[in-house]
Image (tube, rainbow, N blue to C red):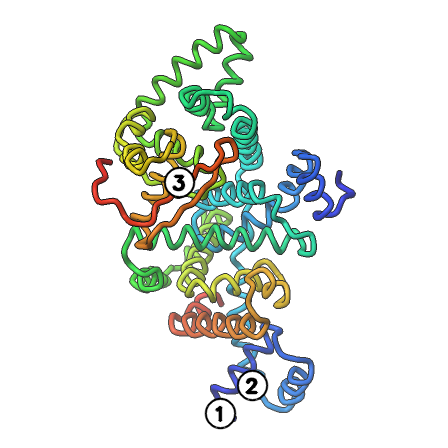
């Protein structure tokens, strides 16, 4: 056995990945070999050094952030399951727009708690308008949430400016679907768009077939890349 | 609620939509999963986001939880995927392979010459700074491991999980876990020796 082999065995011994027999063999060798004892001591120092990377405490507000996200998600799930059918897309988008961010839910609560439901609500609406003007990525975020509520995993990149309505207007998939004789609503087109955006970042062909529970026989598919994308 | 096993909590979350059960799981795994993600990513703020994403996915995929599996195994698996997705995304953005990128910053691992202060005004502060320095260096070392070796190394050395559990989490054979652990150790030992970090500590 050469030095490298010895070191390899000692590393495994230290890492505790040897079978019992091998481990015992290493131990009996160690009892008689000074050189290997020294080697093991050195290796152990490395391990002690690495173990000095202590655990950190998670930020105190982390749990409440997770729970807030969850509440937003359950609201969206409920909305998607029960009310999507009876509500126009504009309403859903409006509803989502106001409730996407857990941060916003928290602010809403603070405002209505201190100013009462009506006045707090008004201030909150004003705040949202201002926020939305500033948040360039808001439409992209909403695309992601809508898509997720439909059970699709998407990755959405920041998309210039514009509101959700503009995002929809600029979406080439609605007209494409119409040309193919398909009936699609903006929500579904947004999903395809989101998948398309994802495709841009993974150079793979996207194939997406989604049957929505509330519209019989409706499928969205996209198997070939589309050339023009105004976004 | 605290009497229930993790798996029982998952069942009550899935079947009764009990958010309190989810919250209990969150409390139980906050520290270990946050630290796992933090060590994987090496950035506290990014870890915060990825931790949220992990629990978002746990909740979203709650119905596909397989009760034959331990919750911890499943949760670690999701956290690992979240980290890998993030690393790949960032790598694409940088257009520089991660390992290469880290090696480029290897020089940041050099220990600086630190003279002994004969009259320390605040020894505990000094101690804290040295400790911080060491932790930063370990962080950089661990980060320099290729992602596959890193996952195994962190799960074993810092999360104290057995090779068998790690094999289940990463869905790889036991032998692969062992060889990755060996290679991870070996690379770190070589790097540490090369940089003389051990002597600095004495």
Q: Is mark 2 on a helix, strand or loop?
A: helix
Q: Quadrant of residue B195?
A: bottom left
- Residue B168 horizontal/vertical position (percent): 61, 63
Viewer-nearest residue: A81 or B62: A81
* Number of the label disc, if any, that sits on residue A220: 3
Disc 3 element: strand
Identify the residue at image location x=46%, y=65%. Answer: B148
Q: How crowded is mark 2: few (under 14 residues within 10 Å), some or many (20 or more)?
A: some
Q: Which residue is drawn at 64% across and 84% down?
A: A22
From this view, report whether residue A12 is shown above or below residue A97. Answer: below
Dots 3 and 2 on the same chain: yes
Dot 2 and dot 1 residues touching (CB under 8 Å): no
Give the foreground label among 3 and 2.
Answer: 3
Decide which of tag 3 and tag 2 comes sooner along the chain.
Answer: 2
Question: Distance of mark 1 from mark 3, alpha carbons?
Answer: 63 Å
Residue B191, quarter of the rendered image:
bottom left
Q: Where is residue A121 in the image (x, y as percent from the top left)?
A: 48, 11
The numbered mark, 1 or 3, whose residue comes first in the sequence reads 1
Q: How far apart are marks 3 and 2 (CA)?
A: 66 Å
- Left or right, B156 with reference to A131: right
The answer to whether A114 is drawn above or below residue B175 in the figure is: above
Tell me how far mark 2 sits from mark 1, CA to CA: 12 Å
Q: Mark 1 — on which chain does it sit?
A: A
């Amino acid at each position: 056995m050469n030095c490298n082999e010895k070191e390899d065995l000692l590393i495994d011994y230290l890492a505790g990945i040897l079978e019992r027999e091998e481990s015992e063999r290493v131990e009996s060798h160690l009892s008689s070999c000074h050189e290997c004892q020294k080697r093991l001591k050195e290796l152990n120092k490395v391990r002690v050094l690495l173990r000095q990377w202590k655990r950190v405490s998670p930020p105190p507000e982390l749990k409440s952030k997770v729970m807030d996200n969850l509440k937003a998600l359950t609201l969206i799930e409920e909305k998607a399951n029960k009310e999507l059918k009876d509500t126009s897309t504009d309403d859903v988008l409006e509803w989502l727009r106001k409730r996407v961010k857990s941060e916003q839910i928290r602010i809403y609560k603070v405002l209505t708690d201190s100013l009462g439901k009506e006045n707090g609500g008004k201030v909150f609406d004003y705040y949202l308008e201002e926020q939305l003007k500033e948040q360039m990525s808001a439409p992209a975020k909403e695309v992601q949430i809508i898509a997720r509520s439909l059970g699709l995993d998407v990755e959405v990149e920041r998309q210039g400016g514009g509101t959700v309505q503009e995002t929809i207007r600029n979406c080439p998939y609605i007209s494409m679907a119409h040309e193919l004789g398909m009936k699609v609503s903006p929500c579904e087109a947004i999903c395809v768009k989101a998948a398309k955006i994802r495709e841009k970042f993974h150079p793979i062909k996207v194939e997406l077939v989604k049957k929505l529970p509330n519209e019989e026989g409706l499928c969205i598919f996209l198997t070939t890349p589309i050339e023009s994308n105004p976004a | 609620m605290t009497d229930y096993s993790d798996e029982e909590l998952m069942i009550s979350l899935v079947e009764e939509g009990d958010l309190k059960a989810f919250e209990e799981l969150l409390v139980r795994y906050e520290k270990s999963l946050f630290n796992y993600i933090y060590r994987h990513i090496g950035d506290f703020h990014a870890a915060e986001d990825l931790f949220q994403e992990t629990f978002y996915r746990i909740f979203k995929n709650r119905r596909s939880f397989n009760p034959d599996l331990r919750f911890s195994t499943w949760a670690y698996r999701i956290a690992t995927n979240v980290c890998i997705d993030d690393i790949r995304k960032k790598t694409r953005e940088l257009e520089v392979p991660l390992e290469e990128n880290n090696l480029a910053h290897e020089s940041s691992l050099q220990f600086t010459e630190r003279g002994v202060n004969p009259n320390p005004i605040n020894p505990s502060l000094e101690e804290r700074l040295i400790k911080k320095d060491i932790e930063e260096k370990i962080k950089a070392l661990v980060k320099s491991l290729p992602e596959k070796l890193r996952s195994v190394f962190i799960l074993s050395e810092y999360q104290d999980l057995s090779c068998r559990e790690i094999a289940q989490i990463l869905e790889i054979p036991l032998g692969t876990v062992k060889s990755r652990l060996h290679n991870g150790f070996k690379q770190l030992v070589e790097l540490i020796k090369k940089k003389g970090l051990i002597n600095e500590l004495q």
